[in-house]
Amino acid sequence: MQGLGIHVLFEGINFQRLLGGLWVTLRLALITIGLSCVFGLLFALLMLSRKPAAKVFCRVWLEIVRFMPQLVLLYIVYFGFARIFGWDLDGETSAVLVFTFWGAAEMGDLIRGALTSIPRHQAESAAALGLRKSQVYRYVLIPQTLRRLTPQAINLSTRIIKTTALVKMINVAEVLKVGQQIIGQFYRQPDAAFWVYFVIFLLYFLVCWPFSVLSGYLEKRWA
Amino acid sequence: MDWSFIGAHVPDYLEGAWVTLRFGLYGVLCSLAVGVLCCLVRYFRIPVLRQVAAGYVELARNTPLLVQLFFLYAGLPRVGIRLSAEACAVIGLTFLGGGYMAEAFRSGLDAVDRSQAEAGACIGLTPAQNIRYVIFPQALATAVPAVFANVIFLIKETSVFSVLAMMDLMNVADTLRTGGGRTVEVLFMLAAAYLLILLPVSVAATLVERRLRYAGFGDSRPV
Amino acid sequence: MSEPILRVQDIRKSFDGSGVLRGVSLEIREGEVVVIVGPSGCGKSTLLRCINGLETIDSGEIRLHNEVISGRKKDLHLVRQKIGMVFQSYDLFPHMKVMDNLLLGPVRALGRPREEVEKEALQMLDRVGLREKADVYPRTLSGGQKQRVALVRAMLMNPELLLLDEITAALDPEMVSEVLNVVIDLARGGMTMAIVTHEMRFAEAVADRILFLEDGVILEESDPETFFHSPKTERAARFLQSFTYASRRDGAEKQSKNNPQG
């Protein structure tokens, strides 16, 4: 075969296959982000609770997540849980479990940070206007919390999307795997690998970059 | 838990840890250099280079290291650029980390009031002296927490080096796991190894940040 | 009379199309204290900032000792070594102790020996009553103390001209005089200065000459006696009047002297 190897991407349905592979990780990321928001809120409430045990629990959880590479956590769940608990989890389930374990803690910490960042006198002056407690939250505290939280939460989401690429390492057929298959089929096109990996690189960028821009924009606007 | 197995394989892990740590450190140091460079280029608004730096930072921050490594290690050789696994590791981590460090330094610089630069200029400092004595020390103090967070992040990311042919911690663990079947012990040691590497970094980060806070030369600004 | 130290000729400067300085000329002679007054936004601060190159000018020329300094880029720091400037916001370097703030310019920019400057710095600190503060970080100082340190920092460069840009505007009222007394002391010592201020009584006390700036042009130039008691232009009179109103609300003891037409 002659010419630039980029043409292998346009042979048959190769490009669709690649996008399909990307969707595998994106779907995992979306599920993870959704679950992280839900559990993150619980995590934040737990962190803010007055019970010392709850605080210690959250602290330890957060530290584990901060110290352990996500890949190590993936290995522990994917390879380890079968041995320890006899649970034979497939790659995608392991991934959602691990990334949510990580994402919920990070999201929880962001929510906690956003909640506590609002100066006390905001609530006080709202109360001084005669607002009921629910109104204080509805009109003053929650809007300000969301403004602070949203850009950071979007940032975390792009990190989650990038991190889901790791599922390649526990045998999930995601975009890199599909790419390898394509390269394998076109082994006579020597520079196919270059173009396939380059395009995957660009695809990730095209997915993540808009989120970064949005996050930066919101941060500036709501600063 | 089979402690004799663990004891017997400590040396393997030490070697793996040394590989992880060494290349992680090279990557971190190069990232710092690239980060400072990008930041200076943008601060002095050097035409062309400044746009290049901005584009690079976006690319680096919005693509997964795993994909970057695949491109470097499996893609580039097909167009005649052959890099050793070690070179790929350092280049990949630097590519990723440089973008993150640049952002950390930039936020530090942004935190320094523009009038500080004017005050420096008004006592006759050259632009270089101004950066060296007035701007940079203040920017660095603000950037330190983010820089340390990046160091921890980058060392965690080294786990992805396992796709390269090098015996880092992940590959040591993987080899033992597939060879001997002692999955639980293997993963336990893996997690412990990362903990032992990252704990000192985290402690150092806390100490430095506390020192900077106590020195507290700056006006207290909310974080 | 001696040659002017500074000669500003018909300078113009606009931001985003709106003219802030619309043809300003002035001269400052050695030992002279020129005070520039005018309503907010009239271009006073911009004028000072143009003089030491913090802002570029669109047209016109600025000469220091007959040497053109406007439009220079490369060796601007050499010009600034001769022109000192103090701002409203003090701008001490927060990461350095007071003494290091003072030494930075003379030692690094001028390359003078540290011990020699240190001795001089202590004398100057003594003169402004802050000798015991040499070893503290700026954040522990009050606004008035910070501003006195900033003045000393500028003076230690032995500038030929000192620019003061509303140096008391950020201060609590009770700290204003401690700073302005230092300036008056400098004026007595023969320091050449261009001062932008809203303190009219201080202006009257310290100025050899008053420039009244409005909408980017100098509308009136007189000695303080004339300016404050029988201003030539109607606009200057109205400007001065506005202080009278403000003074009456502040309290009775402040009025009288500033009041031009009763």
Image: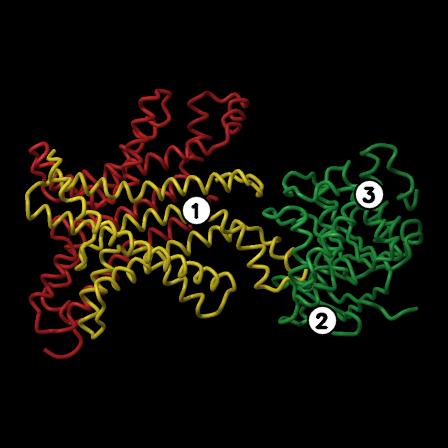
Chain colours: A red, B yellow, C green
Chain letter of the residue carrying label 3:
C
Q: Can residue A93 be seen in this view?
A: no
Chain letter of the residue carrying label 1:
A
Tag 2: Cα neighbours inside 10 Å, few (<14), some, or many (≥20)?
Answer: many
Residue B82 falls in image quadrant = bottom left
**Callouts 1 and 3 close, C-beta under 8 Å:** no
In-image side of B14 versus A86 (left or right): right
Q: Indicate the amino acid at tag 2.
A: Ile
C117 lies above or below C170: below
Which of pointers 1 and 2 indicates the residue nearer the eye?
A: 2
Q: Horizontal and vertical percent for residue C196? A: 77, 53
Label 1, label 2: how far apart the Cα atoms are: 41 Å
**Callouts 1 and 2 close, C-beta under 8 Å:** no
Q: SS of the residue at dot 3?
A: helix
A160 lies above or below C163: above
Q: Is residue C95 visible?
A: yes
Q: SS of the residue at dot 1?
A: helix
Residue A111 falls in image quadrant = top left
Q: SS of the residue at dot 2?
A: loop
- Look at mark 2 in the image and give the residue it sits on: C69
- Look at mark 3 in the image and give the residue it sits on: C243
Which of pointers 2 and 3 indicates the residue nearer the eye?
A: 2
Tag 3: Cα neighbours inside 10 Å, few (<14), some, or many (≥20)?
Answer: some
Give the position of the C terminus of chain C as an image quadrant: top right
Q: Horizontal and vertical percent for residue B208? A: 45, 43
Q: Horizontal and vertical percent for residue B204? A: 40, 42
Which numbered dot is residue A219?
Answer: 1
Tag 1: Cα neighbours inside 10 Å, few (<14), some, or many (≥20)?
Answer: some
